[in-house]
Amino acid sequence: MARLAFIELESRGSPLRIPILYEDRAALAIDKPAGWLLAPTHWQRTGRNLQAAIESSIVAGDFWARSRHLRYLRFVHRLDAETGGVLLLAKSPGALRALSELFESRQVEKVYLAVVHGIPRQREWGCQLHLMPDPVHPGRVKVDARHGKDAATRFRVLQIGSRPGREDCALVEARPLTGRTHQIRVHLAATGHPVVGDPLYGGGTKTRSAAESGGFGLALRAVELAYKDPFTGKAIHVRAPEAEFLRHFGFEPVPASPARA
């Protein structure tokens, strides 16, 4: 039985096709659409719970899942609701445990692209500010050197640009070495260069949803994921398309480099 190259879900009465970027016996990587939350199935405060939608589709026997004989598919790591890009899903509880261990032991390389306000003075830098949930503002994260958990991100400026009628901006590559909530967004905001379209950390009030703004309400996209398969030892490297993201924010294609090859 031929397999579809995408996951097909119902979204507010119309079909949503989510591209499958990579697949093997243990895992499946998708290009997560911005605007979808990753939460347990029972969390039903929104109709855009991606895990719940996937599980419902599997139970319904939809063709994309039936053709793969799927009975289980669960996100291994999280992306913020408004962040799109590479998301890894496990096909079994055993695969979930093994792949989760890779993330927890920091054996997974992650690369993001972010468009930030202003032009950073340094071309490359690192940030190691400790982070913790903000007790005063639920849903936000704050820097706290004493009580926060360790967090580390490497940044590199790729291009300088300007937004029509607005201030200068920059395209930045972010490589988080840890996986704290909102880590990239908080670390960039702490340097004085918040992500464009980020209403939580000073990047501007988002007036339109991701769906209404070409899929990029928040100018942050997960573009690469690399790890060693815990079962076969094979090197896995997954990349998500970035051309549309770059074009949307007025940047040129990023040439391949040793760091991103």
Image (cartoon, helix red, strand yellow):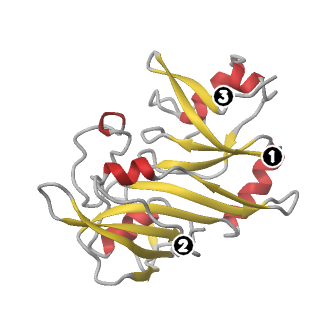
Q: Which residue is mark 1?
A: 26
Residue mark closest to the camera, 3 vs 1:
1
Tell me which residue sits at (15%, 64%) in the image. Answer: 167
Residue 141, position as x, y percentages in the image = 39, 61
Q: Is residue 107 visible?
A: yes
Q: Which residue is mark 2?
A: 257
Q: CA distance from mark 1 to mark 2?
A: 30 Å
Q: Disc 2 on helix, strand or loop?
A: loop
Residue 159, position as x, y percentages in the image = 34, 70
Horizontal side of 128 relative to 74 (left or right) equals left
Determine whether 222 is above or below 211 in the image: below
Q: CA distance from mark 3 to mark 1?
A: 17 Å
Determine the image quadrant of residue 179.
bottom right
Question: Residue lying farthest left?
Answer: 165
Q: Disc 1 on helix, strand or loop?
A: loop
Task: Count all numbered tags in the image, as a single digit.
Answer: 3
The amino acid type, in three-letter code, at marker 2 is Ser
Q: Nearer the viewer, residue 125 or 163?
A: 163
Tell me which residue sits at (82%, 61%) in the image. Answer: 234
Q: Which residue is mark 3?
A: 55
Residue mark closest to the camera, 3 vs 2:
2
Q: CA distance from mark 3 to mark 2?
A: 38 Å
Determine whether 3 is above or below 75 in the image: above
